[in-house]
Image (cartoon, rainbow, N blue to C red):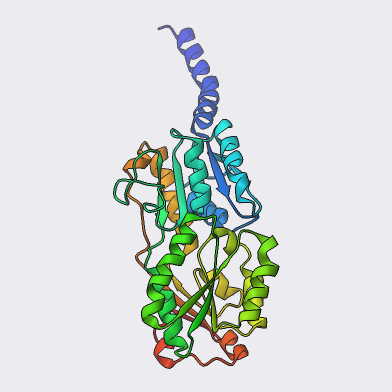
């Protein structure tokens, strides 16, 4: 090659480099779908945090398309189908209802769920070890529900009737109710289930609980119910009801007690699944993850306002006490 040809080839390579870099960057851009039954929730924020920690930045190598059902679960199938049509490279879902809608909408696009209970019993996956198909994610531990009731009874030994708010349209919420009922009888507690499908049910649910005057209040970990946690916590305060909740966020909002795994951490862990799928893993081969660390948080400010005394035997075991 003569000197003129060499220089021409070098100039061509220099000019082509930015184009190649842009092409490579465009090739790396991934589209993530988000599907939630709630009007707004914290799960997407935690997922974003997990993705950032793994090097995925919106506008640089990922875009996120979010769809919210605004408390109307009947909208989830249409919203899932909309995300599939875009299409997205992976679907991230909040809770069982959104996950089931996504599974119905596609058998090829990978689905990563979080904040799901009993995924094997609700039909989402074949098993925890081998989910199968195009779906995997992070789930609750079933016994968390009964343990919450047990701790509530230990904190307030005189309780005998507990109102439990659950979502009858969410199979996992129904299973959570049954799991809690299984623990209730040996503890000498009668559960009083209250169906909640959306904000239109507040007047009925709150009116029934206020009229029956139970000894305490609980909810399942349904994402729709959790999105209204401030309203539920405020109601419990007005009714002077000791309460046990399925996520730390309820206690931060003024609820009395929380026990369980971290829901925000579930979504951060879901980001790890997204990363593994982007790197070639098949979702059906990725075992369902469950929390291994469980926290108990007690809000002593709320206890004082309710006139409730939390035994020292409970306080010394708490991971955090809000004073």
The residue at 37%/68% (across/down) is: 143
Q: Nearer the viewer, residue 300 or 12?
A: 300
The residue at 42%/71% (across/down) is: 181
Q: Quadrant of the N terminus?
A: top left
In the image, residue 314 above or below residue 53: below
Q: Nearer the viewer, residue 225 or 316?
A: 225
Q: Can I make out residue 54 in this image?
A: no
Image x and y of residue 243, in percent: 54, 79
The residue at 55%/59% (across/down) is: 223
Residue 116 found in image quarter: bottom left
Q: Residue furthest left?
A: 129
> In this image, 156 relative to 291: left or right?
right
Q: Can I make out residue 279 in this image?
A: yes
Image x and y of residue 168, in percent: 54, 59
Q: How many marks?
A: 0
Image x and y of residue 289, in percent: 36, 55
Image x and y of residue 111, in percent: 45, 42
Q: Quadrant of the C terminus?
A: bottom right
> In this image, 188 relative to 44: left or right?
left
In the image, residue 57 above or below residue 82: below
């Amino acid at each position: 090659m003569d000197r003129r040809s060499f220089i021409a080839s070098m100039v061509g390579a220099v000019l082509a480099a930015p184009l190649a870099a842009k092409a490579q960057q465009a090739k790396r851009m991934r589209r993530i779908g988000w599907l939630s039954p709630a009007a707004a929730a914290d799960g997407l924020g935690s997922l974003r945090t997990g993705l950032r920690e793994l090097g995925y930045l919106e506008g640089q190598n990922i875009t996120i398309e979010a769809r919210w059902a605004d408390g109307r679960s009947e909208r989830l199938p249409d919203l899932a189908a909309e995300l599939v049509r875009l299409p997205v490279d992976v679907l991230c879902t909040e809770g069982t209802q959104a996950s089931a809608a996504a599974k119905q909408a596609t058998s090829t696009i990978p689905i990563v769920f979080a904040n799901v209970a009993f995924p094997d019993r609700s039909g989402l996956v074949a098993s925890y070890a081998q989910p199968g198909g195009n779906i995997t994610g992070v789930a609750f531990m079933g016994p968390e529900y009964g343990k919450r009731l047990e701790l509530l009874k230990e904190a307030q030994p005189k309780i005998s009737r507990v109102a439990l708010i659950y979502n009858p349209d969410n199979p996992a919420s129904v299973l959570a109710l049954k799991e809690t009922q299984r623990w209730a009888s040996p503890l000498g507690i009668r559960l009083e289930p209250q169906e909640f499908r959306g904000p239109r049910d507040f007047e009925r649910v709150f009116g029934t609980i206020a009229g029956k005057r139970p000894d305490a209040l609980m909810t399942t970990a349904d994402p729709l119910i959790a999105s209204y946690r401030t309203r539920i916590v405020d109601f419990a305060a007005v009714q002077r009801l000791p309460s046990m909740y399925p996520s730390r966020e309820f206690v931060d909002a003024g609820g009395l007690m929380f026990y369980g795994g971290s829901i925000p951490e579930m979504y951060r862990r879901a980001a790890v699944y997204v990363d593994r799928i982007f790197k070639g893993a098949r979702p059906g081969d990725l075992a369902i993850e469950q929390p291994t660390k469980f926290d108990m948080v007690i809000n002593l400010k709320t206890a004082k306002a309710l006139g409730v005394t939390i035994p020292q035997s409970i306080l010394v075991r708490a991971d955090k006490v809000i004073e």
